Image (cartoon, rainbow, N blue to C red):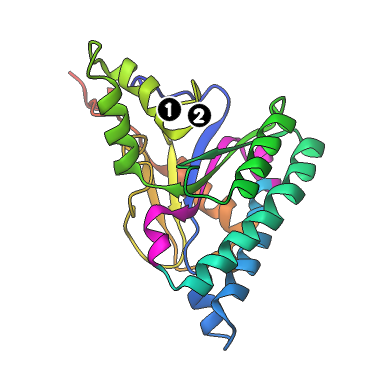
């Protein structure tokens, strides 16, 4: 049995650390911003393909809290790209039945971007084909700390912490464990992404840079996931006795 909080009835929850945009651009003698723009096209390929591959929820690591430390010009380019992406993706999401939401802090974002996110969340709230979550100014450790602080006045259980964690991340009651985490770009670490939710996630690392990631790459990754045996700490039935 999956641990409490896991919900695969609506399809798999897949999380992706979209790594390699900057290196992809540098290898082509382009500005890093060009890699991020190419990465947006990869996002659209994956979002369009996900529902047909059995994915019900897709969480994408768009901008970590640590990314504020990057060069000012790159941060500004990323924020401009988000301001362009959110409205255009809202229209696509409405057409395709995708619910678009954000997890992470909003108080450090430009107010115009926050308004755009809120409009997107409202316009796509009825989407049922895919629950698309963008992690922006996101830190799992900060989210866990906020959730733990909120539990001080009530009895702490794993279920109550799940609810607090969802609230701390901006999802209300939309908490779900991650089934499968993919990281592109060749690095093999979680980078402060969905640490609580990934407690029993299967992990998959690929050298493919995010701008080059295609629906075929997603299909290959999911085929590997299907070959995994998920035991959640239990002994396989064939070994019991």
Pointer 2 local density, CA inside 10 Å: few below 14, some 14–19, many at least 20: some
Query: Looking at the picture, does residue 91 appear above or below residue 83?
Result: above
Please state, as top left, top right, bottom left or bottom right, where the N terminus lies in the image. top left
Residue 171's disc number:
2
Q: Position of residue 198 (x, y in %)?
A: 35, 39
Comes first in the chain, label 2 or label 1: 1
Give the residue displayed 61% in from the left and 64% down from the top. 39
Which quadrant is home to the C terminus? top left
- Residue at the image position 67 percent from the left and 55 percent from the top: 83
The answer to which of 175 and 12 lies nearer the viewer is 175
Number of numbered tags placed on the structure image: 2
Residue wearing tag 1:
166
Q: Is residue 65 magenta?
A: yes
The disc placed on residue 60 is: none
Dividing the picture into quadrants, the one containing residue 151 is top left
* Local SS, label 1: helix
Look at the numbered discs 2 and 1 and tell me whether their residues touch, using CB distance below 8 Å: yes
What residue occupies the far left of the structure in this picture? 241
Label 2 and label 1: CA atoms lie apart by 5 Å
- 229 vs 124, left or right, is left
The residue range painted magenta reads 48-69
């Amino acid at each position: 049995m999956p641990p409490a909080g896991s919900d695969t009835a609506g399809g798999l929850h897949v999380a992706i650390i979209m790594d390699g945009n900057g290196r992809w651009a540098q290898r082509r003698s382009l500005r890093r911003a060009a890699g991020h723009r190419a990465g947006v096209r990869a996002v659209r390929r994956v979002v369009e393909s996900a529902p047909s591959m059995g994915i019900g929820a897709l969480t994408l690591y768009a901008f970590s809290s640590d990314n504020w430390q990057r060069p000012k010009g790159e941060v500004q380019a990323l924020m401009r790209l988000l301001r362009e992406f959110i409205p255009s993706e809202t229209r696509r999401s409405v057409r395709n039945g995708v619910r678009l939401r954000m997890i992470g802090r909003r108080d450090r974002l430009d107010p115009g971007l926050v308004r755009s996110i809120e409009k997107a969340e409202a316009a796509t709230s009825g989407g049922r084909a895919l629950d698309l979550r963008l992690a922006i100014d996101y830190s799992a450790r900060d989210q866990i700390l906020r959730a733990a602080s909120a539990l001080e006045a009530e009895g702490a259980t794993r279920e109550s912490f799940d609810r607090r964690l969802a609230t701390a991340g901006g999802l209300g009651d939309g908490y779900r464990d991650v089934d499968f985490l993919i990281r592109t770009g060749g690095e093999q670490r979680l980078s402060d992404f969905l640490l609580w939710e990934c407690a029993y996630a299967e992990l998959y690392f690929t050298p493919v840079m995010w701008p080059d990631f295609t629906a075929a790459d997603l299909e290959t990754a999911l085929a590997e996931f299907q070959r995994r045996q998920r035991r959640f700490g239990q002994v396989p039935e064939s070994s019991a006795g």
